[in-house]
Image (spheres, rainbow, N blue to C red):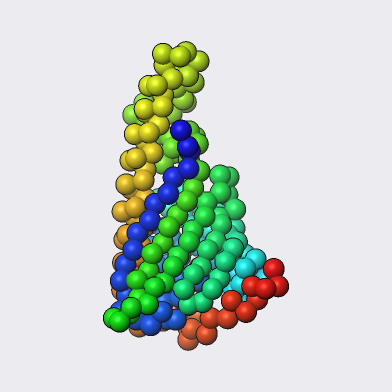
């Protein structure tokens, strides 16, 4: 059974692809639009333009927990593709595509992450005390008859986590849509013309 989880969602935005790309490729603009987190700080390390190899530092709060990590741009092809990897343990990857159409563009975000048992228990807390739950699961995994039960429990956890992450991603994309369509600015505006694709050949 693979521990890899993939979730995705799409939204239609009535705006030029370039305007959308300027938001989804600059995590300093994109992160504050996520209603499930509070941004303490997001910084671009190494200066502009954003390009493959660019690194963003994130300090975020979700509920009562504070998270710090860096994400690295893997691919940047304005105005249609931005891909990054969160340098966490385990790591995660995010791919955002912008597809133009007659009324604007469709934005699709796909997130891929490894979900070992410890992360599943954090994202989908067990009904009993976590240390005891993990001890029982480890004990069951020692016996051939218990392994199918362990596998089934993990599959159900992974399904619940996927549904929750998908709902949250849909809400985030809707917030991005409303932001772009509303013409809202941020402290970084006016938005600069995307230039990250020019540096791609240097990597």
Residue 126 lies, with reference to residue 10, above or below; the image says: above
Residue at the extreme right: 202
**Direction from residue 192 to residue 54 in the image, left or right:** right
Residue 150 position in % (x across, y down): 41, 24
One can see residue 184 in this view: no
Task: Estimate the x, y position of residue 139 in percent, counting from the top left.
Answer: 48, 16
- Taking the image as shown, residue 166 lies to the left or right of residue 195, namely left
Q: Quadrant of residue 180?
A: bottom left
- Tell which of 72 and 96 is nearer to you: 96
Q: Which residue is drawn at the image coordinates 32% and 47% (left, top)? A: 163
Quarter occupied by residue 147: top left
Quarter of the rendering containing residue 129: top left
Q: Quadrant of the C terminus?
A: bottom right
Residue in the picture at 49% in, 47% down: 113
Residue 87 in view of the camera: yes
Q: Position of residue 134 (x, y in %)?
A: 46, 25
Give the number of callouts: 0
Who is closer to the viewer here, 49 or 32? 49
List x then y, in percent, for residue 28. 51, 70
What residue is shown at x 51% (from left), y 68% (from top)?
A: 82
Which of the pair 7/58 is nearer the observer?
7
Q: In terms of depth relative to the viewer, which is nearer, 47 or 82?
A: 82
Which residue is pictured at 58% across the width and 81% down the height? 195
């Amino acid at each position: 059974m693979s521990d890899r989880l993939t979730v995705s969602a799409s939204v239609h935005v009535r705006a030029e692809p370039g305007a959308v790309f300027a938001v989804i490729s600059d995590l300093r603009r994109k992160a504050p639009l996520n209603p499930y987190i509070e941004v303490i700080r997001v910084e671009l390390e190494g200066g502009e333009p954003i390009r493959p190899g660019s690194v963003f530092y994130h300090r975020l709060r979700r509920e009562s927990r504070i998270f710090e990590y860096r994400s690295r741009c893997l691919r940047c092809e304005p105005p249609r593709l931005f891909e990054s990897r969160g340098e966490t343990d385990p790591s995660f990857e995010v791919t955002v595509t912008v597809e133009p159409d007659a009324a604007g563009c469709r934005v699709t975000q796909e997130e891929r992450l490894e979900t070992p048992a410890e992360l599943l228990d954090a994202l989908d807390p067990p009904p009993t005390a976590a240390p005891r739950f993990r001890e029982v699961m480890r004990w069951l995994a020692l016996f051939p008859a218990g392994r199918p039960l362990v596998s089934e429990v993990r599959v159900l956890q992974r399904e619940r986590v996927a549904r929750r992450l998908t709902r949250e991603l849909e809400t985030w994309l809707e917030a991005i849509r409303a932001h772009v369509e509303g013409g809202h600015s941020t402290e970084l505006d006016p938005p600069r013309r995307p230039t990250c694709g020019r540096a791609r050949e240097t990597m």
